[in-house]
Image (tube, helix red, strand yellow):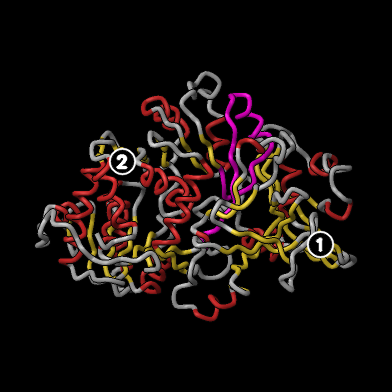
Amino acid sequence: MHNEGLGSWPARRARKTPHRPALVHDGRTLTYADLDERVTRLAHGLRSLGVRRGDRVAYLGPNHPSFLETLFAAGALGAVFVPLNTRLAAPEIAYQLADSGTSVLVHGPAHTALVDEVRYKAQVREFVSLAGTGPGARGYDDLIDGAGGGTGGDPIDEPVAPDDLCMIMYTSGTTGRPKGAMLTHGNITWNAINVLIDHDLLADEVALVSAPLFHTAGLNMLTLPVLLKGGRCVLTSGFDPEATFDLIAEHGVTFMFGVPAMFQAVARSPRWAGADLSSLRILTCGGAPVPPTLIAAYGERGLTFLQGYGMTEAAPGVLFLDAEHAESKAGSAGVQHFFSDVRVVRPDMTDAGPGETGEVVVSGPHVFRGYWGLPEQSAAAFSGGWFRSGDAARLDEDGYAFIVDRIKDMIISGGENIYPAEVEHVILAHPDVLECAVIGVPDDRWGEVGRAIVVPRPGSGLTADGVLAALAGRLAGYKIPKSVVFADALPRNATGKLLKQPLREEYGTA
């Protein structure tokens, strides 16, 4: 086998554990042998459509076995997989298809109308629909069954090296147009190894995959490491708190990943107090800081959150806080993964001292090779071989990192730097605050001051004065926002990250 990339994983697993379940979805189970056979057939089918080494194959649809089959089949051919965010509008999808130069798009039934809309805006050659054959589309199952002229189960012997490009994953684009992060087979494999080591994954792990697979965390921090280890992934097409309880009980789920909002919805369910959660072993959380109240709620059920910090460009794991230090280092993102090197630096790239705020930079075999088609931005993202994250952090005396904020979100008030995330964290500790965001607004005296946009708990009667009073003595005076406004919800992107730009547009005037 000349393939050292992800495309070889199903075959390698099928050699070792052919009869173990790999994927469970909607009452259907695929063993590793099934997965290997389907991936091989799909790879032949894609080859019959003209897919060759380096060609881009995109996928648009909810969590489904076909997402992973397409990823592995593309990898078997040395082609490049492009996962698309299902929550994007047609012009955004058209942009990513055109930007990546995708030649084949595999899509779910719910996206047929959207695909018809973008059909003529991107130079996609072939459309493959999970709904079956239709106008302008081939059927996905037909392709696997060999209707595309494939030769069935003969192994694909395409040499693929770790440094070959595996995936173009578009970053969430909280600023400007999304950029395609180029991740190699080696990047994703080394990240998975970091997860295996630092999460202590077992071969009988049962992962509940309700976070979207198109997001780097759901795919690379949860699903792929579990498949590498030979565990089972239970795929759900969307997150639903009630269904989560049923799936945990039915499948004996051991491992879950989510953004805080997902875990919060589960804890708010009337079933929370009486649910049997005894199978759960690993709960990982990312994408936003975890409110202390949420940590406490899960702690009462004997469950510990393992928090991490990462980014699409690092495939994505950078820092991880293990269970042993979850309480003693609460609020920290932990230390670097095993095969990862992380520094906190000043603008001149010298190391910041303990307690000093600097920029997180990262280096390691999991760090991407640059942005697709953007050589200048790729070069600017690195300094002396270190990827510059744009995130501000402080290290404590023990080397544990505390992420402070995006450097560009920093508010400069009267010459003092205010990091909104630090202020948000304190406001979120208020029991009547569900969500909050802090932005800078112009101020004649200080240049800029903080404004908190708060989503109150319904019926709580929370007032602006009540929010500010709770901060007195807990934050330096200059960090306390000068105004509070209330909102019904905060804008977030598809991965649950808060979008500051729309908030600045709506609430950012003095």
Identified by mark 1, the residue type is: Asn
Residue 297 drawn in magenta: yes
Q: Is residue 409 left or right of residue 226?
A: right
Which sits in the foreground, 200 or 51? Answer: 200
Place of residue 110 in the rendered image (x, y in percent of width and height, measured from the top left): 31, 51
Q: Work out how far the residue at label 1 is from the one at label 2, CA to CA, in angstroms.
A: 48 Å
Q: Check the picture and name the quadrant holding the N terminus.
A: bottom left
Q: Which callout, 1 or 2, points to the residue nearer the camera? A: 2
User: Dot 2, crowdedness within 10 Å: few (<14), some or many (≥20)?
Assistant: many
Decide: is 152 above or below 210: below
Write down the residue under mark 1: 417
Q: How many marks?
A: 2
Place of residue 479 in the rendered image (x, y in percent of width and height, measured from the top left): 83, 53
Identify the residue shown where x is 55% and y is 37%: 263
Bounds of the magenta span?
285-313
Q: Which image quadrant is residue 167 in?
A: bottom left
> Which label sits on residue 23?
2
Q: Is residue 351 left or right of residue 33?
A: right
